[in-house]
Amino acid sequence: MEGKIKVGILFGGRSVEHEVSLQSAKNVIDAIDREKYEVTLIGIDKRGHWFLYDSSNFLLNADNPKLIKLNNSDKEVVMTTGESSGLYSLSENKFLDKLHVIFPVLHGTFGEDGTLQGLLKLADIPFVGAGVLGSVVGMDKDVMKRLLRDAGIPISDFLSYRKFEYNEINFEEVKNKLGLPMFVKPANLGSSVGISKVHSEDEFKKAIDEAFLYDTKIVIEENIIGRELECAVLGNEKPVASIVGEVVPKHDFYSYDAKYLDENGATLKVPADIPEDVSEKISDLAVKTFTTLSCEGMGRVDLFLKENGDIFVNEINTLPGFTKISMYPRLWSETGISYKDLIDILITLAMDRFNREIDLETHKI
């Protein structure tokens, strides 16, 4: 390809993780190789409107995670599909130059759950990260756990309920199945939003109500007492795993505040202080989880290591955080891939996948 590769960095969004996305995007935008890439900044506000931004002023309170917000812009755009697919400027009433690839730095619903990925496939634009299927099953904790269980990957016991089953959720039945404490979570959300650790019946009802604020389906999981470990995975057909890291929360659990607002909310140990054979088992499990869930590009697999040596997969994050305290880029940095090079590899993987798919007969119709 002659000249610079035109990359659209997409961030913000209609998710409760909007502010996390802004932090991640800032780091990606600061680190990307400007000599290799021509960068277009596309911010999505909380109403779902898309705008173009300049890298010098796209954020307000950029250095304060508690106050960070998207700046105003009068350059509204939309993504179109069909023969003239790409970005269309509403303010200038014209199509903009075609982007070669999109780097979504969006977390949670409408960014990480397959909806955006479907739009970008319709627009015929390569994009970083998992495809539609991997994004959907990676986001839905209920479906994800069923697939992992069927693949023989060890997971914690869980139950799932839909909103219409609300009156059938019985505390005593759930307690007898999962024990106390237990975790109640929205099925389709990330960054620990809407998650509660439950110790009693009173807490149980509050947790159910809280989780249903964010999704029409919830999962309830047993509490695994063990060390919280994380492993990053990178690749398409032949994914590889990073070294293993450990999260030591200083809160009751690894909450949203601990991840993104409180720099002292958790200690990240990279590499984790574990035996080499255990590290190898975790790396193998991480890759198996990644491939079982049809993921591509990147993923961070979160696991538990019990005192007796048993390992359980908790979940995968298909668009993990890229903030300055995020585990995914740090794991690769300690493995030998710098932040800047990691961005480059992810963009290359996105374009390789796209080039592989355009040879299919379904793409030629």
Image: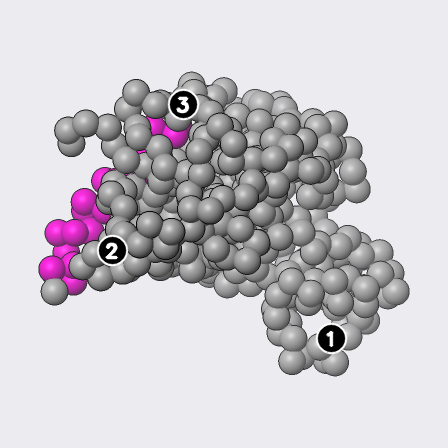
> Callout 1: few (<14), some (14-19), or many (20+) C-alpha neighbours within 10 Å?
some
Residue range (magenta):
342-364
Tag shown at residue 85: 2
User: Which of the two labelled residues, at mark 2 and mark 1, occupies the earlier sequence position?
Assistant: 2
Tag shown at residue 340: 3
In this rendering, which labeled residue sits more in front, label 3 or label 2?
Answer: 2
> Callout 3: few (<14), some (14-19), or many (20+) C-alpha neighbours within 10 Å?
some
C-alpha separation, residue under disc 2 versus residue under disc 1: 46 Å
C-alpha separation, residue under disc 3 versus residue under disc 1: 48 Å
What kind of element bears circle 1? loop
Tag shown at residue 330: none
Q: Is residue 192 left or right of residue 336?
A: right
- Quadrant of the frame with the C terminus: bottom left
Quadrant of the rendered image containing residue 348: top left
Q: Identify residue type, mark 2.
A: Ser
Q: Is residue 173 above or below residue 151?
A: below
Whether residue 99 is in magenta: the answer is: no
Q: Position of residue 16 (x, y in %)?
A: 62, 52
Quadrant of the rendered image containing residue 54: top left
What kind of element bears circle 2? loop
